[in-house]
Image (cartoon, coloured by chain):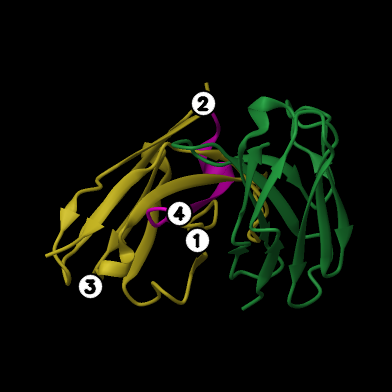
Chain colours: A green, B yellow
């Protein structure tokens, strides 16, 4: 199986800060990487697909980059409503795997 | 409105069986691969299974292979997960999710999720 190592596991930042989360795959997955946001008690929401494509309706402060084994998810200016847990997910093969998640809190 | 609604989650004893259902609306159901994803209490997301748009291909996580069976009825816009030989570690909120790539056999991204149905395996 392809292992996804996401870091940090938790993060505290202030409103307006630039926030970065990384995800590393255990082998080359090209750009087959998605990012999700999950708020407490809610289902996950797709934010970024194919490593860098913004899902329709998602604010432009969210972005993604990377290819191969190293990927980055960025919030350019943190807003209070961005408090959530964020997950990366690979689909390079048919055994889909998620990162362990990053819990984002407001400082 | 595009919507997925899961049902069927209950408390069941170890070794028991259960069938989950997911009713889809607001999109052309038989154009899309569908998935089950689960989340144990306080834990992260775990992909469980997928079924292709035409029902011809199915895949499973190693943790459920041989015990769970995914199926769909395109005439009823419905997705199912038959769960047998349940274990305490199967306790989780089970989500159905829609793939975002029409008429593809390979998975892509999960763009629509249901609200989840809770399965508790306990004696």
Residue under pointer 2: B26
* CA gap, disc 2 and disc 4: 19 Å
* CA gap, disc 1 and disc 2: 26 Å
Q: Earlier in the sequence, mark 1 or mark 4?
A: 4
Q: Chain of mark 4?
A: B
> How dense is the environment of label 1, judged by Cα within 10 Å: few (below 14), some, or many (20 and up)?
many
Query: Percent position (x, y) of residue A70?
Result: 84, 65
Q: Earlier in the sequence, mark 2 or mark 3?
A: 2
Residue under pointer 3: B85
Magenta span of residues: B27-42
Q: Residue furthest front?
A: A107
Which residue is located at x 82 percent, y 59 percent? A71
Which residue is located at x 24 percent, y 68 percent? B86
Q: Residue furthest top?
A: B1
Residue under pointer 1: B46
SS of the residue under disc 3? loop
Q: Chain of mark 1?
A: B
Q: Is residue B41 magenta?
A: yes
Residue under pointer 4: B36
Say if mark 2 contacts mark 4, CB within 8 Å. no
Residue B89 image label: none
* CA gap, disc 4 and disc 3: 18 Å
């Amino acid at each position: 199986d392809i292992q996804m190592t996401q870091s940090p596991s938790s993060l505290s930042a202030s409103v307006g800060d630039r926030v970065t989360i990384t995800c590393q795959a255990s082998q080359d997955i090209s750009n087959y990487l998605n990012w999700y946001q999950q708020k407490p008690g809610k289902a996950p929401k797709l934010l970024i697909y194919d490593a860098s494509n913004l899902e329709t309706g998602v604010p432009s402060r969210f972005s993604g980059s990377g290819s191969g084994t190293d990927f980055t998810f960025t919030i350019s200016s943190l807003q209070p409503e961005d408090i959530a847990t964020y997950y990366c997910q690979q689909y390079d093969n048919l055994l889909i795997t998620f990162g362990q998640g990053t819990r984002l809190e407001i400082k | 409105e595009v919507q997925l609604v899961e049902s069927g989650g209950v408390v069941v004893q170890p070794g028991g069986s259960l069938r989950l259902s997911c009713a889809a609306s607001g999109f052309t159901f038989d154009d899309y691969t569908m998935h089950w994803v689960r989340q144990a209490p306080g834990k992260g997301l775990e992909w469980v299974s997928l079924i292709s748009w035409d029902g011809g291909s199915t895949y499973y996580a190693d943790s459920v292979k041989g015990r769970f069976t995914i199926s769909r009825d395109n005439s009823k816009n419905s997705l199912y997960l038959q769960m047998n030989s349940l274990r305490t570690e199967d306790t989780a909120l089970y989500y159905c999710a829609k793939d975002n790539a029409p008429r593809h056999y390979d998975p892509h991204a999960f763009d629509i999720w249901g609200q989840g149905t809770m399965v508790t395996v306990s004696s």
